[in-house]
Image: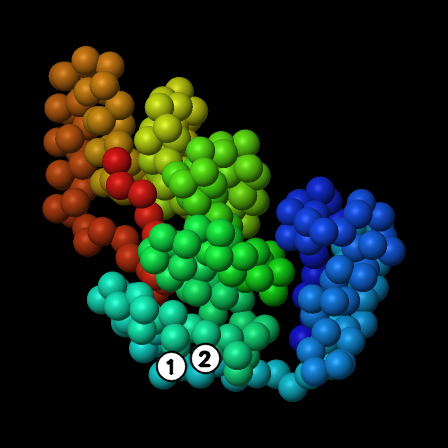
Amino acid sequence: MTIIHPLDNFIYELFPNAEKNEESLKKAISDFYTMQNVKPIIKFSKEFVEITIDTKRIEVEGNKFQKLISLCEKAKFEEAKILADELISSNPNISEYHRIQGQVFSELGNQEEAINSLIDALRWNPKNEWALLMMGNIFAKFQNDIETAMKYYDQVLIVKPNDSITLNNIGANLMQLDRKEEAVKYFNKALKSDPSYPNTYYALGLVAEKENDYKKAFDYTLLAIAQTNKQTNKQTNNFILTVSI
C-alpha cells in the first residue's frame, strides 16, 4: 500500500503533534503507520511525502460494512459503534471504517472522538471527501469555528470542485451561522454546477425569505418543486451527516 500526502500546511492538520520540519513530521508519520512493528518506508520529495506499508492488501469485509451502513441508516448507533470498532480492529488501514466511526461518534454526541476518528480516516486517505466534509460540519455546527471548518471545506473542493451536493452543504452550514453572504456564494456555485439540483433552489428561497423578498422566495420554491418532480433526489452509498436549512 502506498499513501501520498501533499507537503503543504494541511498535512500538519492531520499530524498536529509534528513540528514543521521534515524530521519531526517523518517521526509522526512513522509512529502512526507502524503496524505490528513493521515500519513504513517514507520518502520525501519537494512537494509530496510517499508512505509505503509492507503489508498484505486487506480485502474489504463487504457484508459487515453493508451491515454497518444499515445500522446507521436505522439510527442504531450503539450497535453500529461496536461493529465499526470490530472492522477497524481487523483492518485499521481502511479510511471508510474510520469515517463511519467518526459519524457514529458525532451522532452519539461525542464530537471530540468523532474528530479523532475522522482525522484517522484522512490519514489513510487524505482525499476522502466525506470525511473532509464531516470535519467541516463538526467545526462549523458544534464548535462554531468557521476558520477551521473552511480549511476542510476548501480541501473538499480541491477533491471535488464542482460537486453540487458538497457546495450546497457548505452553504447550509454557513446559513445556520448567519453568514448569509458567504452562504449565497456557495449556493450560486452549486446552482451553476447543477441547475437541476432542487435543494439549492430551496436554499436560495430561504435566503430570499430572510430578506423579505417573498416573490423571489416563491419563485425559487416553485423551481425546487419542479426539479424535485423531474428527478429523484440525489443519493449516495455513503452514510453522511448533512445539515438541513
Q: Amino acid at mark 2?
A: Glu
Image spot of residue 221 (x, y percent): 15, 30
The residue lying at 23 percent from left, 19 percent from top is: 210
The residue lying at 14 percent from left, 17 percent from top is: 214
Classify the position of the C terminus by image quarter. Answer: top left
The residue lying at 53 percent from left, 79 percent from top is: 89
Classify the position of the N terminus by image quarter. Answer: bottom right
* Vertical side of 40 occupied by 48: above or below: above
Find numbered disc 2 in the image and state the secondary structure of the residue it sits on: helix
Does residue 42 appear in the picture of this structure?
yes
Q: Quadrant of residue 141?
A: top left
Q: Quadrant of residue 217?
A: top left
Does residue 11 appear in the picture of this structure?
no
In the image, taking residue 69 as reference, residue 127 lies left or right, namely right
Q: Nearer the viewer, residue 88 or 181?
A: 88
Separation of residues labelled 2 and 1 (CA atoms): 9 Å
Whether tag 2 and tag 1 are in contact, CB under 8 A, the answer is yes
Which of pointers 2 and 1 lies earlier in the amino acid sequence?
A: 1
Observer-side mark, 2 or 1, equals 2
Image spot of residue 160 (x, y percent): 50, 48
Find numbered disc 1 in the image and state the secondary structure of the residue it sits on: helix
Q: Amino acid at mark 1?
A: Lys
Badge number at residue 86:
2
* Vertical side of 98 occupied by 16: above or below: above
In the image, taking residue 75 as reference, residue 58 lies left or right, namely right
Q: Name the residue carrying label 1.
A: 64
Badge number at residue 80:
none
